[in-house]
Image (cartoon, rainbow, N blue to C red):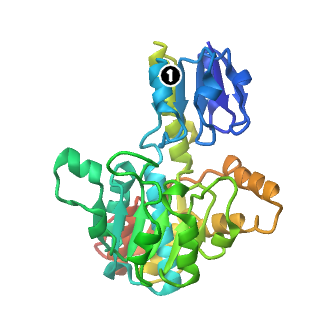
Amino acid sequence: MIIAVDEAIPFWQEMFPQLGQVRPFAGRDVTNRDIRDADALIVRSVTVVDKDLLEGSSVRFVGTATVGTDHLDLRYLETHGIRVASAAGSSANAVSEYVIAVLLVVAGREKWNLAQMSLGIIGAGNIGKKVNLKARALGMSVLLCDPPLRDLTGDQKYLSFNEVLQSDVLTFHVPLTFAGPYPTWHMINQETLERLSPRQFLINSSRGAVFDQDNIKIALQEGRIAGAALDVWHNEPKVDYGLLDLVNIATAHIAGYSLDARIRASEMIFQQLCSFWSESPSWENRRHNPETMQIALDRKCQGEEILLSAVLEAYDILEDDRKLRTLKGLPEAEAAKGFDRLRTEYKLRPEFTHFAVQLNSHHRAEAEALMELGFQVEVSGAGSGVQ
């Protein structure tokens, strides 16, 4: 078996050689010639898999180590009998931690009290569910919008887009779709932006084209919304640095790039490929998990400051923001290569569960919130016990 694998997928050297000959490639540069005699193709979101790439090839299995599949021509793959595998759900916790980091950082800057604010979650699938639980741990009131899930389940907790649109913060966790009853392309556009107010904040960690970037830029310039955090961009890896200057948090499509998520994604594709070819090799992922790391908090921290300090110790989202902003001013081609490097050379961050925080009994509420966010927490003090 010949397996063509994007060289940026973690742990491919340990997994796929068990199954056959492995041929690594650069995700943005792969051509039909590179994979023509391959039996399986393993990609990331930077590779468009369609007729142009696959025509005349021997590929019978396409796996994408991503949640989304909008870079795959699913109709072509189905009609040609090519099995498709994705890593749906693998990055859900990582993205939810990213959203929590955004909320706490911006709340600290803007003096928000998150416990008095509402969060509208657009897309209540694997990621949206995790965001929901973590936002409630911060005391936020949460509104869920997922029309396909509402149609499927009849559950009235899934509100319409119009009902959720007035939330203080809107965070988007939807696939990029162009047709059907609920297309997500340019969900945030001139018309929806005109219905928002200067108190509202937007977060996009789904796909860049879910937002109409030209109109977002105008709304931010004119102060018609409170701000935005963007992890995804139109025309990646080319970024509109004029827009970047206007947003509160800007990152290079790395919201889902935790160590845990990337292990899960690679392992999911590996297992599905094994199943497709009726192979049964194994891979031990535990040795890649880090030992528990202790977080020492400033004793002067109170309330949400404790949560922000713990989260930034575990995941310094401000460093990711800084790194992307340093690309501004470079020639377009060089900046685009820099954007890709920020992704392919990203130092995978451990998720919150690998961090332990010690608090005294006066901060029991904060301890409970941190535990719900995923941290290991010990509460010290008379009669407090270990949590």
Give the structural element (helix, strand or loop) at label 1.
helix
Give 163 or 303, whichever is nearer the viewer.
163
Q: Is residue 225 above or below residue 312?
A: below
Position of residue 281 measured from the top left corner of the image (x, y, whole percent): 52, 18
The residue sitting at 53% across, 17% down in the picture is: 60
Give amino acid for label 1: Leu
Instruction: Tell me if residue 234 can be seen.
Output: yes
- Residue 341's spot in the image, x, y percent? 73, 51
User: Which residue appears at 59% of the width and 26% of the height?
Assistant: 51
Near-viewer residue (27 or 210): 210
Which residue appears at 55% of the width and 53% of the height? Answer: 350
Q: Seen in the image, is 181 located left or right of residue 375?
A: left
Q: Position of residue 236 (x, y in %)?
A: 65, 53
Q: Residue at x 34, y 74 (%)?
A: 167
On the image, which quarter does residue 381 sit in?
A: bottom left
* Residue identified by numbered label 1: 273
Query: Which quarter shows the C terminus?
Result: bottom left
Q: Quadrant of the N terminus?
A: top right
Give left or right: position of 150 versus 204.
left
Classify 200 as above or below 124. below
